């Protein structure tokens, strides 16, 4: 019996090249401003039009400022990239959700919330965190700029079929433990290369009980284990989330779609290339201490001793971060807090953050950036009155964008400063040259924001 990955992959195979790659049909291409300009130039140089323009959606997110979006972008490089995407989309007849449009935001947040990402699809974007859309029950993965051009021209891509892995997490998550903690735990167990060459299917009690937002967070971080992508079989949670969305099927089409989506699951006798099983009781709120997302610990744990293999890189990471093996990070002073990114910029993340800070005050010496993943999320924050709760505690809601996830816009963390961040990467300089990033969940970020130090959120819940 085939795995779910096999079912979706096989349905999209156009042809298989002998001793070569598979030509795979792509249902949805997302384009942002950073990885698309050369692809458009290549199309232009060859005199080509997009083969299926209605399957391609464009929006700026990496370079967009998170304040004063109604004014010209000050940084000339960012301004050029954002305006170039708008021009290219217009020239090639593609849907473009520009800055200040109600449809704009981070592409990996907007795709699912508009019903553009649907179960059974193949989805690509010139961005590694395209794996996020796998939460919808889709095969979604990041591609290079030359491949973006390939999809524009043919709506197909040449790909080697990856191996399949199933990761099951069973049991019930403890209080204060979120999907982000699950992902950070898996990264520490597998390391950042442990899933290289695989497409991961997440399963088990914990995954079944995750909300759609939680699933999007988990799948978003698949790439940080080295996986080609990660996904979750669609179920009632998926169908309830998709129903009524702008691009979701309607009427009889909806009934037909759901009937098909219900077949999208791995058979009981499906054989995976690798199977891993974990227990929810082993997972507590997590934080990272190093310079890759796999260097993480439970928030109450001490930093591990240097490993015998890779000792040099371990010591270099700790030196960069200003930490020592054997110490605990609880009580460590922090400077910045960032809530947002395609990892944790959804409404549920803002609800979680607000649940901790409500009735408390932001620590005086902490700079906090709270950045919704889309204008729709920002509207939801206002509709639910969360903006009032956050403002009363000394926080300000910014405008949507990738923000401090990466140093491509104004929201940069200064050198040497510690940022407790809900984003996905903590490499040297990721949030600004010399910045030090501690990855965590929205609950851990909120606890740090009101105490000014790394704090176990369970003490504040």
Image (tube, helix red, strand yellow):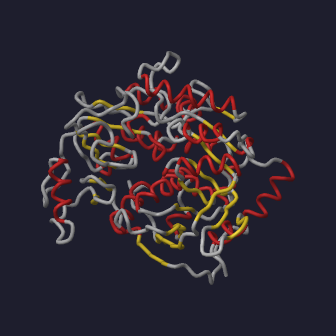
For the residue pair 277 and 57, the one nearer the viewer reads as 57
The residue lying at 75 percent from left, 42 percent from top is: 54
Residue sitting at the far front: 46
Q: Is residue 176 above or below residue 197?
A: above
Seen as rendered, the residue at the extreme bottom is 269
Spot occupied by residue 270 in the image (x, y as percentages of width and height): 61, 80
- Left or right: where 308 falls relative to 228: left
Q: Residue furthest right?
A: 252
Please tell me in which quadrant of the rendered image residue 2 appears.
bottom right
Side of 399 relative to 321 (left or right): right
| Residue 219 x/y as whole percent | 51, 57
Q: Residue at x 22, y 41 (%)?
A: 453
Q: Is residue 213 visible?
A: yes
* Front one among 190 and 268: 190
Can residue 398 be seen from the camera position used here? no
x 36%, y 28%: residue: 393
Up/down of 381 relative to 425, above or below: above
Residue at x-position 42% and y-position 19%: 74
Left or right of 344: which side holds 53?
right
> Could you tell me residue 155's position as x and y percent?
70, 52
Image quarter (top left, top right, bottom left or bottom right) of the N terminus: bottom right
Across the whole image, how many numbered discs are drawn on residues?
0
Residue 103 found in image quarter = top right
């Amino acid at each position: 019996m085939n795995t779910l990955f096999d079912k979706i992959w096989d349905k999209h195979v156009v042809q298989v090249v002998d001793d070569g790659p598979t030509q795979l049909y792509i249902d949805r291409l997302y384009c942002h401003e950073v990885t698309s300009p050369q692809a458009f130039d290549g199309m232009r140089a060859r005199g080509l039009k997009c083969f299926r323009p209605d399957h391609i959606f464009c929006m700026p997110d990496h370079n967009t400022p998170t304040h004063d979006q109604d004014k010209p972008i000050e940084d000339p490089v960012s301004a050029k990239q954002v305006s170039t995407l708008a021009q290219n989309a217009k020239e090639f007849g593609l849907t473009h959700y520009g800055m200040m449009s109600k449809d704009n935001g981070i592409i990996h947040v907007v795709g699912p919330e508009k019903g553009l990402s649907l179960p059974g699809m193949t989805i690509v974007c010139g961005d590694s965190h395209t794996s996020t859309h796998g939460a919808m029950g889709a095969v979604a993965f990041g591609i290079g700029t030359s491949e973006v051009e390939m999809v524009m021209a043919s709506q197909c891509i040449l790909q080697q079929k990856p191996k399949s892995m199933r990761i099951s997490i069973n049991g019930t998550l403890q209080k204060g433990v979120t999907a982000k903690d699950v992902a950070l735990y898996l990264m520490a167990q597998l390391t950042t290369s442990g899933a290289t060459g695989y497409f991961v299917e997440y399963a088990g009690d914990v995954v079944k009980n995750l909300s759609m937002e939680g699933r999007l967070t988990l799948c978003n971080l698949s790439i940080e284990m080295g996986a080609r992508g990660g996904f979750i079989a669609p179920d009632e949670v998926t169908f309830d989330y998709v129903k009524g969305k702008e691009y979701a099927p309607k009427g009889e089409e909806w009934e037909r779609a759901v009937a098909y989506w219900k077949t999208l699951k791995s058979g009981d006798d499906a054989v995976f290339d690798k199977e891993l099983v974990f227990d929810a009781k082993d997972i507590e709120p997590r934080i990272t201490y190093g310079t890759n997302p796999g260097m993480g610990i439970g928030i109450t744990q001490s930093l591990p001793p240097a490993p015998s293999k890779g000792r040099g890189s371990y010591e270099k990471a700790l030196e960069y971060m200003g930490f020592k093996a054997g110490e605990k990070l609880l009580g460590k002073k922090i400077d910045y807090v960032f809530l947002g990114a395609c990892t944790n910029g959804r409404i549920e993340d803002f609800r979680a953050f607000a649940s901790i800070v409500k009735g408390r005050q932001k620590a005086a010496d902490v700079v906090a950036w709270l950045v919704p993943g889309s204008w729709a999320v920002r509207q939801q924050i206002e509709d639910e009155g969360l903006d009032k709760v956050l403002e009363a505690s000394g926080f300000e809601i910014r405008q949507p964008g990738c923000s401090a996830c990466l140093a491509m816009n104004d929201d940069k963390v200064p050198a040497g400063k510690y940022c407790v961040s809900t984003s996905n990467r903590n490499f040297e300089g990721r949030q600004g040259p010399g910045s030090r990033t501690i990855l965590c969940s929205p609950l851990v970020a909120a606890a740090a924001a009101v105490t000014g130090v790394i704090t176990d959120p369970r003490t504040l819940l």
